[in-house]
Image (spheres, helix red, strand yellow):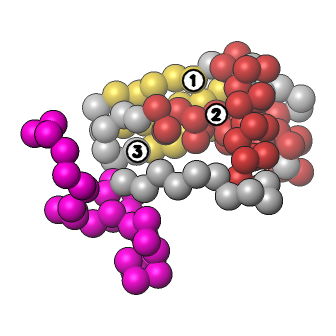
Amino acid sequence: MNDFGQLIIEDCKSGKQKIAHKYQVLIYMLLFPLSPKGKALCQGQTPAGRLVYPDEIVEISPLDVDSEFKDFFLQTVAIISGSTPPPQAPSHWECRYCNVPAAYCPARIELGADTGKHDLF
């Protein structure tokens, strides 16, 4: 809680700032008040958010959990829970954390993989 009695959802990060970090905290801010413990602590209010990086603290306003964000969240949930799988968008950045071997995932991208012939570089 801050000095004004407002609950703060805080997430500590060890790397560089990413917009995904903000969305992660916004999701917590949206959903925590709906949980049994959150209902008791938030008392109908949206909590504030805070991202703590090694060199900076980023405050997130409860006002950021607005109708636009809620619509985005609902659309995202509809996509990932739908009967049609979303289009694949593999990248080395994401694939490096996945433990599914390339033999079982044709979309997997390995570092240094042949990405096709082109004349860009």
95 in the magenta segment: yes
Q: Are marks 2 and 1 in contact (CB under 8 Å)?
A: yes
The residue at the point 38 percent across, 77 percent down is: 102
Residue type highlighted by circle 3 = Lys
Residue type highlighted by circle 2 = Leu
* Quarter location, residue 56: top left
The residue at the point 79 percent across, 59 percent down is: 83
The residue at the point 28 percent across, 31 percent down is: 55
Q: Nearer the viewer, residue 42 or 92?
A: 92
Q: Earlier in the sequence, mark 3 or mark 2?
A: 3
Q: Which mark is residue 13?
A: 3
The residue pinned by badge 2 equals: 26
Q: Secondary structure at mark 2?
A: helix
Q: Are marks 3 and 1 in contact (CB under 8 Å)?
A: no
Q: Position of residue 91 (x, y in %)?
A: 37, 54
Q: Main secondary structure of the magenta part?
A: loop
Q: Secondary structure at mark 1?
A: strand
Residue 81, relative to residue 28: is it above or below? below
101 in the magenta segment: yes
Evaluate whether residue 95 shows in this view.
yes
What is the magenta range? Answer: 92-121
10 Å neighbourhood of mark 3: few (<14), some, or many (≥20)?
some
Q: Residue furthest left?
A: 121
Front of the two marks 2 and 1: 2
The residue pinned by badge 1 equals: 60
Q: Secondary structure at mark 3?
A: loop
Evaluate whether residue 5 shows in this view.
no
